Structure formats: structure tokens, C-alpha cells
Image (cartoon, rainbow, N blue to C red):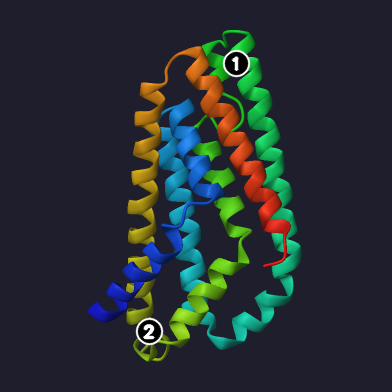
């Protein structure tokens, strides 16, 4: 049983650590808003990873054949969403730089609240079919997880969730530190523009053949 949990930890860190658009979004949210918002986004990503790990552990080999044909269209959808977020981020950054936003306006739009950040990041992370294929491959390679029943599978999923959550929360904390270090208008403008450009670049990269 402990082997399944440790395998989940390793798998969770394996899928969470590479820096991509999701990590940049979490970092940017924490820097622009607060750790609460960044933490909500981080937990949303961990929830999606846990759900995909659970689907992989329960679905087994048959799941890969179902997901693989949809990988291309889902990649396009994810890229479109990322481009939309990049454009929205550019607009918000420019508006905030040109005029001082009121507390109500800053707190009630986009992903500037924990609930909205959680919902947005959960949906965006679930658009990545590569994650479930990754977990399917790992589960099928471990008979103690795939064939030994519900308890090892649950331990595997718990390990994935804890690993992903700990890493994403670390990113959110880093974003908060960056936000405090760059509290001036120019610092916010630079980080907002950089975040949007990086997200747009990652969206374009997602459309390129692998």
C-alpha cells in the first residue's frame, strides 16, 4: 500500500513540476492579487490531477484509446482558452496601469477571487488530455496499483493530489513574494505584460505538432 502512495507522489511531482502555462497563471494570479487567490488556483490544478489519476486508475487500458483521438481538438480548445486569457491579461494590465482601479473592481472580475480562480484553473487543467494518458501509462506499469483493488488505487490518487497541491502552493507562494517585491505601477505593468506574452507563446506552442 505504501508503494502505491509513494508511486502517486512521484507521479504527481512528475506531472506538476515542469513549468508551463498553468504555473505561470498561478504565479501571475498570486503576484497580482493575493495568496488566497493563488492558493485556490493551485488547489484547482491539484484537484484536476487527482481526478485524472483516479480516472486512470479506474479506467485502465481502455481509457487511452478513448482519450487519444480527442487529444488534438482538446489541444486546440486549450490553446484558444490560453490565448483568451493572455489577451484578457493584457487588457487588464493596461487598464490598471492607466487608471487606479477601485477595490470593488479589483476584487470582482476575472479570476481575482478564490472561487473564480478555482473554477477557471480546474476547467483549463481538465482540458489537457496528456495528463490522463500519463497517468494511464503509469498505472498500467504498476500491477500493485492497477490490479490490487480500490485501496492501492486510492492511495495512488492521494499521493498524486498531495504532490501536485504542495508544488502548486509553492508556486503560489512564490508569486506572492514577487507581487510584494513589485508593488509599484511599473513593476505590475512589466510582470503583467510578461505573463501574458508567455501564456500566448505557450498557447501557440500547444498548436504546433509534437
Q: Nearer the viewer, mark 2 or mark 1?
A: 1
Q: Is residue 1 in sight in this rendering?
A: no
Which residue lies at the image location 66% right of the left edge and 75% below the top edge? 67
Q: Reply above or below: 10 against 92.
A: below
Q: Reply above or below: 138 against 174.
A: below
Q: Is residue 132 left or right of residue 11?
A: right
**Splitting the image into 4 quarters, where does residue 74 fall?**
bottom right
Which residue lies at the image location 54% right of the left edge and 67% below the top edge? 131
In the rendered image, residue 125, in percent from the top left (x then y), is placed at 56, 55
**Secondary structure type for disc 1:** helix
**Quadrant into which the C terminus falls:** bottom right
Number of residues whose C-alpha sits closer than 10 Å to that of mark 2, classed few (under 14), some (14–19) or many (20 or more): many
**Secondary structure type for disc 2:** helix
Number of residues whose C-alpha sits closer than 10 Å to that of mark 1, classed few (under 14), some (14–19) or many (20 or more): some
Q: How many numbered dots are placed on residues in this image? A: 2
Residue identifier under label 2: 145
Q: Reply above or below: 199 against 152.
A: above
User: Do callouts 2 and 1 mark residues in contact (Cβ within 8 Å)?
Assistant: no
The tag earlier along the polypeptide, 2 or 1, is 1
Residue identifier under label 1: 96
Tag of residue 133: none
In the rendered image, residue 41, in percent from the top left (x then y), is placed at 47, 43
Query: Between 24 and 198, which is closer to the camera in this rendering?
Result: 198
In the rendered image, residue 81, in percent from the top left (x then y), is placed at 70, 46
- Separation of residues labelled 2 and 1 (CA atoms): 50 Å
Q: Is residue 34 in sight in this rendering?
A: yes
Query: Between 61 and 153, which is closer to the camera in this rendering?
Result: 61
Q: Reply above or below: 146 against 173.
A: below
Which residue lies at the image location 48% right of the left edge and 19% below the top edge? 187
Q: Is residue 69 left or right of residue 153?
A: right
In the rendered image, residue 75, in percent from the top left (x then y), is placed at 70, 60
Amino acid at each position: 500500500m505504501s508503494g502505491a502512495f509513494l508511486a502517486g507522489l512521484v507521479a504527481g511531482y512528475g506531472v506538476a513540476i515542469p513549468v508551463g502555462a498553468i504555473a505561470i497563471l498561478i504565479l501571475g494570479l498570486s503576484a497580482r492579487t493575493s495568496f488566497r487567490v493563488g492558493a485556490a488556483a493551485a488547489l484547482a490544478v491539484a484537484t484536476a490531477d487527482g481526478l485524472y489519476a483516479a480516472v486512470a486508475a479506474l479506467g485502465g487500458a481502455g481509457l487511452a484509446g478513448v482519450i487519444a483521438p480527442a487529444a488534438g481538438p482538446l489541444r486546440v480548445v486549450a490553446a484558444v482558452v490560453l490565448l483568451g486569457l493572455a489577451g484578457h491579461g493584457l487588457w487588464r494590465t493596461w487598464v490598471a496601469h492607466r487608471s487606479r482601479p477601485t477595490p470593488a473592481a479589483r476584487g470582482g472580475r476575472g479570476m481575482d477571487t478564490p472561487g473564480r480562480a478555482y473554477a477557471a484553473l480546474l476547467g483549463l487543467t481538465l482540458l489537457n488530455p496528456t495528463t490522463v494518458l500519463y497517468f494511464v501509462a503509469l498505472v498500467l506499469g504498476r500491477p500493485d496499483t492497477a490490479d490490487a483493488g480500490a485501496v492501492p488505487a486510492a492511495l495512488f490518487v492521494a499521493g498524486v493530489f498531495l504532490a501536485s497541491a504542495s508544488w502548486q502552493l509553492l508556486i503560489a507562494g512564490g508569486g506572492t513574494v514577487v507581487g510584494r517585491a513589485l508593488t509599484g505601477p511599473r513593476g505590475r505593468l512589466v510582470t503583467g505584460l510578461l505573463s501574458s506574452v508567455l501564456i500566448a507563446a505557450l498557447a501557440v506552442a500547444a498548436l504546433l505538432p509534437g
